[in-house]
Amino acid sequence: MGNPRDSGKAGQGGDRSPQGAGQGRRGALRAPSTAQEIGSPSFPIRETPVTGNVPRFEIPDWREKYGVVAGITGRGDQPGRGFDLGLWSEAPVGLVMNHWRNFRRALPEFTAVALGQQVHGVEVMTLDGGAGWIQVEGIDGWVTSRPGILLTVTIADCIPVYLLVPGRAVAVLHAGWRGTARGILERGLNQLQSITGCSPADIVMHCGVGICGQCYEVGSEVVEGCGGQVVGSGPWHVDLRERLMDRAGELGLSRVTTSGWCSAHDRASFYSHRASQGGDGRMAAYIGMSTHAAVVHPHQ
């Protein structure tokens, strides 16, 4: 995420306990005044580990509440590069493809898996159907209203943004600083609203596992590109999840949560391009409407 001049040292803040993870905003924490505030940056949720041969973490309650499977793969405990899903990395292609096959077998209710070669852009593709592997060049986000299609983006610090309209459609976006600055969130929301006719208040959003603001040291162009003001001579830090959540609120979304995991702080479980100085693997963030889902109430 970002080019060499944007890069800095990940994890400069030192070790962080689980209780203190994900505190993206400065200042003292306070108790939430309403249930909706539990998903604020000060009170994040943590994707929970899934038992099985494939290291995965899922967004709590989405499967049960919405009939949606949404989460991210992890590093795992395999030797070497771990459960690396980076197709455009230095990892052996055969090993990576075997990981992808195992990942697909872990979610047998999906008959198609969509993935793209991401370019830190804003192109979002809507899928109306398909089977097997669907691979498209230059795509940084996916939308579908069809059960049985698993949408994926690969991640190693950038923010996976999960969107759903309960019972109607889902989307996943790859939001690095360039995509965030250029409006990938707006593009994804527009396409989701176009195929469902929903209002912003109907949309549920989660900013998933990615690098936290404390670890994301950037150049002035990143600060300005993400809508901030450059103060002083640096170094500067940007919290992409906080920026995405603020923008979602401006666009009328009210059901928004954020992850308490940081890909750099929590590198034992996840991959971080920054913390590894470019040598790490990739995770797959995924979402899909399960064909095995129970009845979902659209206004939950």
Image (spheres, grey):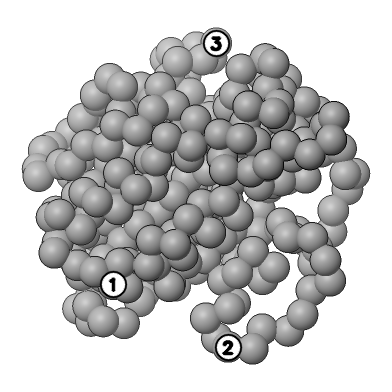
SS at circle 2: loop
> Which residue carries the number 3 mark?
90
Q: Earlier in the sequence, mark 2 or mark 1?
A: 2
Residue at point 18% right, 42% down?
A: 126
Could you give the CA–CA distance between mark 1 and mark 3, rounded to whole angstroms? 41 Å
Say whether residue 284 is visible: no
Q: Earlier in the sequence, mark 3 or mark 2?
A: 2
Q: Quadrant of residue 83?
A: top right
SS at circle 1: helix
Residue at point 52% right, 58% down?
A: 245
Q: Is residue 115 left or right of residue 193?
A: right
**Disc 2 + disc 1, Cβ < 8 Å:** no
Query: Above or below — where is 192 with respect to 91?
Result: below
Q: Quadrant of residue 196?
A: bottom left
> Which residue carries the number 2 mark?
34
Q: Amino acid at mark 2?
A: Thr
> Which residue carries the number 1 mark?
202
Furthest-right residue in view?
A: 14
Split into 4 quadrants, where in the image is the C terminus? bottom left
Q: Amino acid at mark 1?
A: Asp
Q: Please provide percent x and percent y for residue 84.
A: 53, 28
Q: Amino acid at mark 3?
A: Glu
Using the image as rendered, state which of residue 99 and residue 202 is in the foreground: 202
Split into 4 quadrants, where in the image is the N terminus? top right
Query: Above or below — where is 120 with respect to 182?
Result: above
Using the image as rendered, state which of residue 61 and residue 262 is in the foreground: 262
Q: Earlier in the sequence, mark 1 or mark 3?
A: 3
Could you give the CA–CA distance between mark 3 and mark 2, rounded to whole angstroms? 47 Å
Q: Quadrant of residue 34?
A: bottom right
Q: Is residue 3 left or right of residue 104?
A: right
Could you give the CA–CA distance between mark 2 and mark 1, rounded to whole angstroms? 19 Å
